Image (spheres, rainbow, N blue to C red):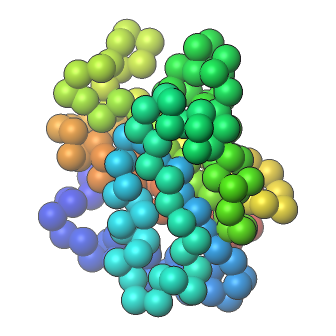
Amino acid sequence: MHDYRDTASRDTLLEKLKQRVLVKDWRIVTAESCTGGGLAKALTELEGASAWFESGFVTYSNQAKQTLLAVQAQTLACYGAVSQQTVEEMAKGALARTQADLSVAVSGIAGPGGGTVEKPVGTVWFAWSKAKGGTDVYSCRFFGERHQVREQAIDVALQGLLRCLDGAL
């Protein structure tokens, strides 16, 4: 498991991501819930991020997901905020509201409370969507304390962005 006190791996990942997005001349937008803006913060730590980072939405509440990203109330009622359907709508909504070429959405249960048998603490859903392409959705369960779950989610989101830029989507 990655040691989040050592940022060397994340720094390397971010630098690769920056180079790939600059070559494509694309812009990235984030739609975050459980990471609380941590993903946008990680991306904007890089010098020159304004050349490729469009914006970030932190939509912690269901109402914010609906208002800012057009997540359907029915989606939230039927599947919940932590679901494939919700992150897919978040990713597409972020693209629809910006001039970005690539979006990433994250929603999960960082803990320590809030988990259920069906969606235990550490469950996180991700979606990556291209303005001119498809959407990829992924789920995983992380272990550790709240901070660790959030940091692991940020790294998976960044890795997914890199895969998208390398043509995986």
**Residue 128 placement (x, y as % from top left):** 64, 52
Q: Farthest residue to the front: give it.
A: 67
**Is residue 137 positioned above or below 155 on the image?**
above
**Residue 85 placement (x, y as % from top left):** 65, 29
Q: Is residue 117 left or right of residue 127?
A: left
Q: Quadrant of residue 60?
A: top left
- In this figure, what is the number of numbered marks? 0
Which one is in front, 122 or 106?
106
Q: Is residue 124 left or right of residue 95?
A: left
**Is residue 74 positioned above or below 15 on the image?**
above
Quarter placement of the C terminus = bottom right
Which one is in front, 28 or 55?
55
Q: Farthest residue to the top: give it.
A: 117
Q: Farthest residue to the right: give it.
A: 132
**Picture residue at 58% right of the left edge, 54% below the top:** 104
Residue 12 in view (yes/no): no
Which one is in front, 153 or 78?
78
Q: Is residue 12 left or right of residue 99?
A: left
Residue 81 in view (yes/no): yes
Q: Quadrant of residue 8?
A: bottom left
**Picture residue at 32% right of the left edge, 18% below the top:** 115
**Residue 5 placement (x, y as % from top left):** 15, 64
**Picture residue at 29% right of the left edge, 42% below the top:** 149
**Residue 48 placement (x, y as % from top left):** 47, 90
**Picture residue at 59% right of the left edge, 38% below the top:** 67
Which one is in front, 22 or 142?
22
